[in-house]
Image (spheres, rainbow, N blue to C red):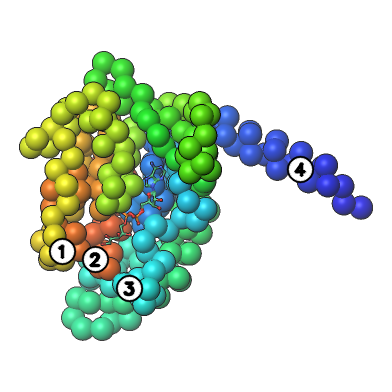
Amino acid sequence: MLDEIKISKAIIKTFTDKLVDNLDLDVAIVGGGPAGIVCGYYLAKNKIKVALFERKISLGGGMWAGGIMFNEIVVQSLAKKILDEFDIKTKLYKENYYTADSVEATSTLCSKATKAGLKVFNLVSVEDVMIRKNNITGIVINWSAVEMARLHVDPICVRAKFVVDATGHAAEVSNIVTRKIGSKLKTKSGRVEGEKPMWAEVGEEAILKNSREVFSNLYSCGMCANAVFGSSRMGPVFGGMLLSGKKIAATLIKKLK
Ligand code: 48F
């Protein structure tokens, strides 16, 4: 016998317990592209209380689609080690150029990260931040459907010791900070510098340097880091995204332990 009301209660109770349990975090990650997922995986594996908030239904950001919807991604030797660790198959194309099936790569990142303990809230958009005495202290969330329908519905808040901006090209959290309190970022202009034109080699080199604190307790991760600090974009080479996620996780683990 299956009772529809029991099914409904099971979903409502389990989800609300999960949400309530994640309103006070060590780390809140905004954006579930490859950078945010990898960051969440290493944090969760190290028993940090971490949750990831993603606007869309599925995690993975721009990784599913490879380049122009040809569903293969490219990574360099250094980042291949991360794919190896996740047990994602790679093929050597030419020295220092490895390819991976983007569907296998993305779905495995999602699976391993959640199995490591990363809590994910999809269909949720971060629309604001909490700031106390010039420190980020949390994020403000609402349903993406509310955002899309432009409904007048007030949000709720999640406290976090650290917030990771892994929102990709749009650098949404960093832009919210400057919109709300002015030119206070740790960048040249104090604002989001904006991404520079495509230059894969330069962009990939810059991304690790740019993966760092951009405002007190707010960290730039993945493509967002290059957008915030004004470096090149790099297209469908994903090594920098993986390495950036791992670097931010290592930085925060050190701070939290
Ligand atoms: O864009 P995205 O995949 O960022 P990433 O992890 O990787 C970049 C690559 O995909 C590619 C590239 C490779 O060289 O340049 O573009 O840095 O994933 C960002 C995710 O953040 C979500 C968005 O839906 C996407 O899945 N996102 C953006 N803004 C918000 C958000 C927000 N305000 N709240 C919640 N999620």
Q: Which residue is mark 3?
A: 68
Q: Which residue is mark 1?
A: 198
Q: Earlier in the sequence, mark 2 or mark 3?
A: 3
Mark-to-mark CA distance, 2 and 1:
7 Å
Mark-to-mark CA distance, 3 and 1:
15 Å
What residue appears at the point 52 percent right and 46 percent down from the top-left corner?
Answer: 123
Q: Point out residue 97 in the picture as x, y percentages from the top left corner.
A: 22, 77
Considering the numbered disc 3 on the image, is that residue within a helix, a strand or a loop?
Answer: loop
Residue 235's label in the rendered image is 2
- Displayed quadrant of residue 130: top left
- Quadrant for the C terminus, please: top left
Q: Earlier in the sequence, mark 3 or mark 1?
A: 3
Above or below — where is 156 with respect to 4?
Answer: above
Q: Amino acid at mark 2?
A: Gly
- Label 3 Cα neighbours within 10 Å, binned few <14 / some 14-19 / many ≥20: few
Camera-side residue: 226 or 79?
226
User: Please, which residue is most extreme toward the top here?
Assistant: 133
Q: Earlier in the sequence, mark 4 or mark 3?
A: 4
Is there CB contact under 8 Å for labels 2 and 1?
yes
- Displayed quadrant of residue 29: top left
Above or below — where is 66 with respect to 137?
Answer: below
Q: Amino acid at mark 4?
A: Ser
Residue 8's label in the rendered image is 4
- Label 4 Cα neighbours within 10 Å, binned few <14 / some 14-19 / many ≥20: few
The image shows a total of numbered marks equal to 4
User: Please, which residue is most extreme toward the right here?
Assistant: 1
Q: Amino acid at mark 1?
A: Met
Q: Amino acid at mark 3?
A: Ile
User: Please, which residue is most extreme toward the left here?
Assistant: 188
